[in-house]
Amino acid sequence: MSKNVLVIAAHPDDEILGSGGTIKKLVNNGYRVISVIAAKGRKEEEHHIKPLMLKANKQMGVEEVIFLEFPNLLLETKPLHEINKAIEAILDEYDPSIIFTHHYGDTNRDHQILFQAVLTAARPLPGKRPVEILCFETVSSSEWSQHTNDKEFKPNYFVDITDTIEEKIKSLEHYDIEMRPFPHPRSYDGVKYLSRVRGMTVGVEYAEAFEIIRRVWK
């Protein structure tokens, strides 16, 4: 089994918001985690978001960050096959065993498009080793989805991050320009409270929740 794991996120900070505690836990257990950031940050942040992104990931033990630099909040203006090809090239290079990415029901359109691109790029073709795909929840997007349809985030896989929650918060401090005051979900307290709720669901102090799209035992 490959020890490579890809975290494919739409924007800088999404990778830590959605799976920061899990990233650190994977690194601590000998996995090689590579963060892939599809789009640039907001226009007013473009000139300094990249070094902040590198510092935030380094805090979690991630040494490789791939920045695709698609336009922020405009992924829908790009042909889907162009995004697919960029992700396929990364999959071919790193041959991951697991991919973490956005949930298909997020309110953010970039998140939806990236999920579709990942699903297409990682399709289980004959002769290729199948890749596990897990969707993370992104505060201020996943929970704002309408709760009356089948696209609601349905957590069915949990990771105990009690030992890594503080590292997650420290990593997010590098993205402080993206954080908001509580009670905004994308606040330091909001992130910790959600981890508390997910933890209580499975009997631990803090957890991150995921929705399984594909798991393969081979």
Image: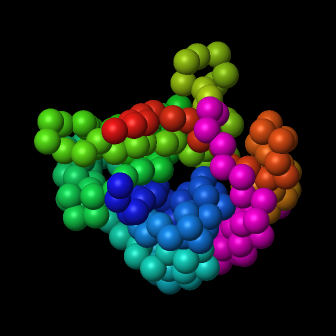
The percent position of residue 34, horizontal first and vertical second, equals: 41, 67
Q: Quadrant of residue 172?
A: bottom right
Outermost residue toward the left?
Answer: 127
Q: Quadrant of residue 2?
A: bottom left
Q: Is residue 181 left or right of residue 121?
A: right
Q: Residue 89: give x, y in percent of width and height.
A: 20, 59
Does the magenta segment cover residue 173? yes
* Residue in the picture at 64% in, 16% down: 148
Which sits in the foreground, 180 or 94? 94
Query: In the image, is residue 43 above or below residue 9?
Result: below
Tell me the residue at 72%/66% (across/down): 164
Q: Residue at x 18, y 37 (%)?
A: 125
Q: Is residue 113 visible?
A: no
Whether residue 207 is visible: yes
Nearer to me, 211 or 190 = 211
Q: Say left or right for 177 vs 40.
A: right
**Location of residue 138 with respect to 96 vertically, above or below:** above
Q: Quadrant of residue 141?
A: top right
Residue 95 location, x and y as percent?
27, 58
The span picked out in magenta is 155-181
How far across and how far down the image is residue 67, in percent? 37, 69
Please tell me whether residue 69 is drawn above or below residue 191 in the rendered image: below
Instruction: Check if residue 103 falls in the magenta segment.
Output: no
Q: Quadrant of the C terminus?
A: top left
Q: For the point 68% across and 37% down, which residue is it?
A: 143
Q: How is the image coloured?
A: rainbow
The mark total stands at 0
**Quarter of the image that includes the N terminus:** bottom left
In terms of depth relative to the viewer, which is nearer, 115 or 28? 28
Instruction: Using the image as rendered, state which of residue 204 and residue 90 is in the foreground.
Output: 204
